[in-house]
Image (cartoon, rainbow, N blue to C red):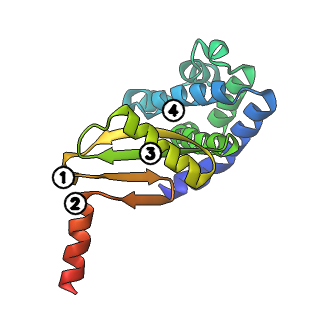
Amino acid sequence: MSQALTLARPYARAAFALARDAGKLPGWSDALGFAARVAADPQAAALLGHPRLGRDDAVALLAPAVSEQLGADAAFADFLGLLFDNRRLPLLPEISGLYDELRLESERVVKAKVTSATALPAAELESIKAALKKRFGREVEVEAAVDESLIGGAVIDAGDIVIDGSLRGKLDRLQTTLAQ
């Protein structure tokens, strides 16, 4: 996995630079996401690895037919062609993920996942979002998830920072303290 990320990083940076210079960050994000989903499909992966598959056919398979509507352009098709030439099409999922990280960083947005024991009301999610915005000094995108094994409370995962306010987490910490 780490080798794939190492190989994907320069391509993600190049894609980001192309999209930023063209002013099409969201369009490239959507187009890369589509191409990554196709490349990750086992049947498509087998086809992409076939030695008789040509560059134009690979690009046609991976570039969404509506890439112009998504905000991508001919540069995106050229980028996919470069990946094909360098045999890096299997790296598209990693490239897409790294590209999205670069995009969020440039837009000063933090992605946070709030996992709770039960579904949280919208007002509570907004309260968490406001607190995270104040803490990070950036815009925050919140994704909500439910994990009943938490028993109560919530776990907030925002990149490098994890805030565990779950009852299960508190019980685990108490058990560790008592065991010592």
Secondary structure of the residue carrying tag 4 is helix
Q: Quadrant of residue 126?
A: top left
Q: Amino acid at mark 1?
A: Ile
Alpha-carbon distance for marks 2 and 4?
36 Å
131 or 117, nearer to the observer? 131
Give the residue displayed 50% in from the left and 30% down from the top: 48
50 or 120, nearer to the observer? 120
Residue 16 at x, y percent in the picture = 70, 38
Residue 3 versus residue 101 in the image, above or below: below
**Can residue 52 be seen in the rendering of this structure?**
no
The mark nearer the N terminus, 2 or 4, is 4
Q: Which residue is mark 2?
A: 168
**Residue 36 numbered mark, or none:** 4
Q: Nearer the viewer, mark 2 or mark 3?
A: 3
Q: Amino acid at mark 4?
A: Ala
Alpha-carbon distance for marks 4 and 1?
36 Å
Q: Amino acid at mark 3?
A: Ile
Q: Badges 2 and 4: C-beta atoms under 8 Å apart?
A: no
Q: Which residue is mark 3?
A: 128
Q: Amino acid at mark 2?
A: Arg
